[in-house]
Amino acid sequence: MPVLIGIVALLNGCEPSSQPFECTDAIGCVTIPPGEPIKIGVLQTLSGGSAPGGTDQTRTIQLVVEQRDHTLLDRPIILQVEDDRCSPEGGANGALRIVADPQAIAILGTNCSGAAVTAGKIMSEAGLVMISSANTAPSLTAIGQIRGQDWQAGYFRVIYNDATTGKVAAEFARWVLGIDAVATLDMDNLYSRSLTQIFHQAFTNIGGKIAFSGTINPEDLDLKPALKSVFNSSAKLLFFPFGEPEKSLLLMRQAKSMIDSEGGENMMFLGGESLMSEQFIRQAGSDGIGTYIAGPALVSSPEIEALESAYQSKYKEPPLTTLYSFASDATNLLLDTIADVAIAEPDGTLHIGRQKLREALYSTENFPGLTGHLTCDQFGDCGAIEFNIYRLDDPKAGVKGLSRNIVY
């Protein structure tokens, strides 16, 4: 018996001891010592005309983290919130502040597509991932399975791609309304220009004519010269995907004034998803009646109702836009994927491979989100939401009333 014990002891002594972790990830690892937090950047619009959407998303991200007790893998979650200012400069500056911390893992944002172009490049080169719940410009991912010019490795979005939006809007104008000539007004930003270009191409491909096309500068307050050109053209419908509810409201009020004084009452109006906001609907009132809006389907479920209730309880007001449910999906997708790829050492040290995190997100299939089951493609498009055309008939009913008035 002593001989046997000695042999077992000898064999145990020959077993290799556990080796220290060695990062072999292609673009590096984030190593988080025991007790230190998991750091995530939040890059959203917190000032200017697009602030309501950015605020809704920021608040929802904070709420989702709070509902997780501010922890992931037994670590506190720290959010670094920055303002993308809905501009390329704001996106770049915010992203630079986030990636300056070598422990930063990811960015939830941006709100505006133009800010995503610069922020995405900085994010990608630093080895992070970024998931947007609001960017819709096709160039950020792909158009017809062709990679967009602003695509960056590590960029994802859980909202729809405006390559679909522009096509649906064009089909509605041409086939449902029976219009053969339209006018367009866009704002001088990536989102508005991209969506207008997609609309132009889709409308002319099905036999329509662009009777007038103009651009509004963000600082313009007098839109009547542009509207006069619209009314003087042969167009029967104006497509105006501005991206800012305030600017859309200004256009509607000035158009209504011109119609009352100069005619043009047969002109129809079709705006983008930014009009699906309590801010626009409430303030537009009777001036907005009859306006068509191209926007996402609003999903109704007990989970969304619970999120709305928690949002209102915490912030003492309901969400002003439809972006809060997308922000919840982006946050949960990111946090769950981080938990899946993280490697924990016996002493509690965590290692997160940056490329491994990207690959896990690209391989996402049927992730159960509030907006649907998310599946990410090779370009970073993960959205599951359907797309509709609505008509605003009852401003007092707000967004929920609008969402029931689907015309296409």
Image (cartoon, rainbow, N blue to C red):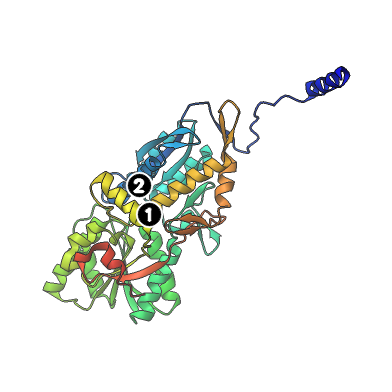
Between residue 181 and residue 311, name the one nearer to us: 311
Q: Amino acid at mark 1?
A: Ser
Q: Which mark is residue 325?
A: 1
Name the residue at 55% across, 53% down: 364
Q: Amino acid at mark 2?
A: Thr
Q: Give the secondary structure at mark 1.
A: helix
Label 2 packing within 10 angstroms: few (<14), some (14-19), many (20+):
many
Label 1 packing within 10 angstroms: few (<14), some (14-19), many (20+):
many
Name the residue at 33% across, 78% down: 181
Q: Earlier in the sequence, mark 2 or mark 1?
A: 2
Q: Decide if residue 230 is on the left or right side of residue 171.
A: left
Between residue 10 and residue 42, name the one nearer to us: 10
Name the residue at 42% across, 80% down: 207
The quadrant the N terminus occupies is top right
Point out the residue furthest to the bottom here: 178
Q: Decide if residue 343 is on the left or right side of residue 201.
A: right
Residues tagged 2 and 1 counted as in contact (Cβ below 8 A): yes
